Image (tube, rainbow, N blue to C red):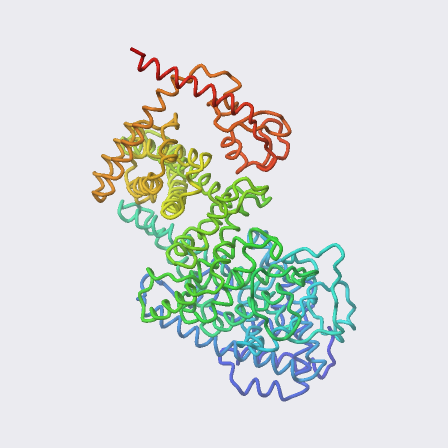
Amino acid sequence: MTLPPTQQSLLPALREEWRLFLPGLTENLWTVCLCVAALIQVFVEYIQPQDPSNGHQYQKTLLGEILSISCLLRTPGVVENHGYFVNPSRSSPQEIKVQEANIHQFMAQFHEKIYQLLKNLLQLSPDTKHLILSWLGNCLHANAGRAKIWANQVPEIFLQTFASDSFFLNLGAALLRLCQPFCKPKSARLLTFNPTYCALREINAEERKSRNIHMKGLEKETCLIPPAEDQQPDFPQNFNLVTENLVLTQYSLHLGFHRLHEQMVKVNQSLHRLQGAWRDAQQSGSAGAENLREQFERLMTIYLCLKAALTEPQTLQNCLQLQVSTALLLVQVALGNRGTEPVALTFPIPDVQHSALAYVPEFFADNLGDFFIFLRRFADEVLETAAESLEQILDFITVFTGSVERMKNPHLRAKLAEVLEAVMPHLEQTQNPLISSVYHRQRIFCSYRHAARLAEALIKVFVDIEFTGDPHQFEQKFNYRRPMYPILRYMWGQDAYRESIKKLADYAAANLEAVNPPLFLRFLNLLMNDAVFLLDEAIQYLSKIKVLQIERDGGDWEGLSADHRREKESNLLMFGQLARFHNIMSNETIGTLAFLTSDIRSLFIQPFLAERIISMLNYFLQHLVGPKMGALKVKDFSEFDFKPQQLVSDICTIYLNLGDEENFCASVPKDGRSYSPTLFAQTVRVLKKINKPGNMIVAFTNMAEKIKSLADQQQREEETYADAPDDFLDPIMSTVMSDPVILPSSRVTVDRSTIARHLLSDQTDPFNRSPLTMDQIKPNQELKERIFKWLSERKQQSEERRHPAV
């Protein structure tokens, strides 16, 4: 852009003046700039980049220079001459806190000045407002690539193509302040937001100015749900500033805060690994200890700078208000509310034709989730002081987590489960004067009016993420389910949530042969699938670790080449990490089954579920108390989160919870792979060894004797029925059928319990893969009667042989 000579002569002095005064940002400078019309004109025109399509060019403008001031590293990874948090390991915690507080004080004042500048420019005149909003919209559009995965993998290209993290940190903070007037509780302006703004496509420059449309490219964003085939957006004549402010701010946070949060998590994880390596090197007297210390110092400086930049209190409060308001707004959009006053949330939520959720980009919900997860990790005290706002978040989670009709993306819905885990009370970790506010959070959570719906939504997303369509869905599902286990455990301890879960179980027990398997039945099936896989994997990794530890401690590695030894060390480290993850998750799944069976029995004693859980429990006991336990004796159980005593205790608890049911006990000896009376005797010895209560040991001993008696009886029956005709045998299990049914497509007859178990995981005919549901199977009454008659005859013959007539 070429400026008139009179304005060109002002530019060098203006730039120099801004740079001289920026460190202090005195009130006089802002006053001068906002009062001199010529200076304003120069400023607004001068901030236009030479190449508007290059995101990095915006950072080189005068406004960009202002926005780039922060405590973050100017060059990623380069801490030399940075000036903040130098040699942090040699500073006391108090010194670090003081430095962080000083940074926060400056940032709060700095953000306020940027906000005042933007606010005054927006209010100055329609033309100035249009130019500033255009600059913001174009800047965000040019930097859209910051959110792409590849941007984090090629830092050299990133630095040349996009504006810096500091730039977006400050821009986001200023925009958050602009949003505060309509983010106040019960603000009438909030619901004037029009989601169709995000569905606009090609618009000329004149229309953008007249209709207040300054963001570009939003039509390419994935929205919460796809539009209906006949759905067309109803665009207004023009859009208000609330709509533009909210979109600009959320997109800025999407490009800035989200990326910085990811960096902070990665740096935090690296610090933990590096600290462990440094400690080990010090203990062993390794020459590399000093190098590890230097790496730790550098990484700690980066972490502390990130933390200081992201935890400025006023910005966090402003972001909290924005995200709570966004939660309220999206719930109202889901309800189909087109007015300016919120309507009450009631269930069931009515179907909304042509929902405006089809125009809301996913980054609205992603930002919300990202922020509350950040608070839980790095600034939990903010949640402790915001308990009253959390009901809006619970509403949002309840409405969207369990509904593919309101949020299609299963990954995003799974993330909301992590948000729920973040906002729920964490009493065991509270050690500060704000503990009363944690109890306040507990009160909000426990008295939540839609508790039953929230519990159902959590279980629904647990089931839904089994099949996401992603090529990595199998590995992902365990990470997604990780936060769900502590939530379920907490819910189980609260009456309202517990009763709602029991109702889901009762409904499942009453509808076992429904066309679509009931939600809770699918949940239990997946829970057991996970338990088997996770503990089995953990057992295998622990076995490999033991072999490697024996080799290392026995000196076998000393004669290896350097490369071969590094490979062994790498394998040991990798197996350790994998074992720890699988142990943590298996502990959670078995623990969940333990508390669920304490009050839910009707489902677990169904033959097809009872057989599954029994074979699983016996298999685990074989490895934990049986002859295979020696393979798991690694050097330090705690290093790998291996808790065999807790696992044995939970398994025995599950057995005792269900052991009063005759049918369940009768199913135990049918597990031909793992059950034996010796296994249960070994379990009793372990219970004594780990000092479990006497009443638990006595109860388990009595149950074991009862099961042995049933096993002896079944053995006699099996001998009696050993020559059963082939058509009496289940073709999959090779056992005599008790309730034969005909599969409609393949016409094969199987036992009802066998096909019921199969259909939980795969709703197809196992013999020809055609679609199949339980309601389609037909009883084979004629065969059932023949089997019953044959069994009765053989039983009578057996009795006569045992007790011949005199």
Task: State the residue lying farthest toward the front.
Answer: 806
Residue 194, located in which quarter of the rendered image? Answer: bottom right
At x 59%, y 80%, the residue is 117
**In the image, is residue 460 above or below residue 233?**
above
**In the image, is residue 603 above or below residue 323?**
above
Seen from the viewer's position, the closer of residues 612 and 643 is 612
Residue 558 is at least partly visible in this image: no
Seen from the viewer's position, the closer of residues 430 and 82 is 430
In the rendered image, the quadrant that contains the N terminus is: bottom right
Q: Please state if 662 lies on the left or on the right of 474 as rendered.
A: left
Q: Position of residue 384 (x, y in %)?
A: 40, 68
Q: Position of residue 739 (x, y in %)?
A: 50, 29
Q: Please state if 393 lies on the left or on the right of 679 as rendered.
A: right
**In the image, is residue 420 above or below residue 701?**
below
Q: Position of residue 283 (x, y in %)?
A: 26, 47
Q: Please state if 212 lies on the left or on the right of 502 as rendered.
A: right
Seen from the viewer's position, the closer of residues 324 and 230 is 230
Q: How many marks?
A: 0
Task: State the residue lying farthest toward the top.
Answer: 806
At x 43%, y 55%, the residue is 499
Residue 90 is at least partly visible in this image: yes
